[in-house]
Amino acid sequence: MTSPINEYTDTHIIVNNSPDIAGRPVNTRTVMIGSQKGGVGKTTTTINLGAAFSERGKHVLVVDTDPVSSVAASLHLEVPDFCGLERAAAGNADAILRDVEPGLDVLPCSPTDFRSDVRIGGWIQQLGEQEFEDPYDLILVDSSPYTGPRSRDLLCSADELLLVIRAEPLSYRTLPSFLHDLRRLDNLDLGPNLRGIILTLPQGEPLGGRWENGLRNRFGSRMMPQAVPYDSVVGYSLAQGLPVVISDPESVPAQQYLELAAELEQRWDEEEANGVVPRSAA
């Protein structure tokens, strides 16, 4: 999934024409994109799902909660000092970078967002309770790998979780314990709904290969039907500061992300038709 990124010096500079924040949009859905470890394609998945949903006419906000600012770095964004989750949660809409791609906004992190005494999850919840002049249909939260209390705090702030894992032997050993932790949160009515597990494939592993099939056989319906193969086109896209669904929409990884967005939207539409709403809106 990850590829060496060529040197590229261009930087996207976003001008904020920011509306004020007032209350809460009824149908905003907050989805965390999580992983158990780094290097599995979590940030790439977050960025490309955000772009795929914006291509489908959704207004999307991608929130970066990773201290290394992976989203901003991947999209070559210049982040002004006044940006950050704490400011946005307090009602400062100028903390958000607008129209990184049409319909896709980014809320980058600030170094002060990661003081040891703060609850980032609480800010995510506050953000979801805001209403923008142009409300968001979807908030995608790119989180750092699951490591402990702060990760659990973030989990509790989301309506849903999409877990990104690499199709490899280690996943067999680590995934059951993570699912156990998630069930404990669910039993306390604190955790998000596990929407599904997204597989990314290591270099040389084909779609429908041994490790993918093994994980699907073990974890069944928890697995999303799409899987994202390793392809150097993803690295080339990131070298341009672009999601692959924008730079090369006919490539296999882009098609998998586009199909994944369509699959998720269909599931949400069916649930809403049956009266099921996001946890935070219930």
Image: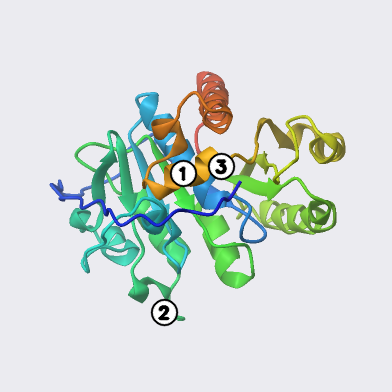
| Tag 1 secondary structure | helix
Q: Earlier in the sequence, mark 2 or mark 1?
A: 2
Circle 1: residue type: Tyr
Q: Is residue 74 visible?
A: yes
Q: Are marks 3 and 1 in contact (CB under 8 Å)?
A: yes
Q: Residues within 10 Å of mark 2 (few under 14, many from 20)?
A: few
Instruction: Residue 236: give its label.
Output: 1
Image point (34%, 62%), residue name: 85
User: Residue at coordinates 37% horizontally, 34% vertically from top-left?
Assistant: 137
Contact? badges 2 and 1 (CB < 8 Å): no
Nearest the viewer among 252 and 20 is: 252
How far is disc 3 from disc 2 in space, using C-alphas? Answer: 36 Å
Pick whichever of labels 3 and 2 is earlier in the sequence: 2
Report the label total. 3
Q: Nearer the viewer, mark 3 or mark 2?
A: 3
Q: Which mark is residue 253?
A: none
Q: Which residue is mark 2?
A: 115
Dot 1 crowding, Cα within 10 Å, few <14, some 14–19, many 20+: some
Q: Which residue is mark 3?
A: 232
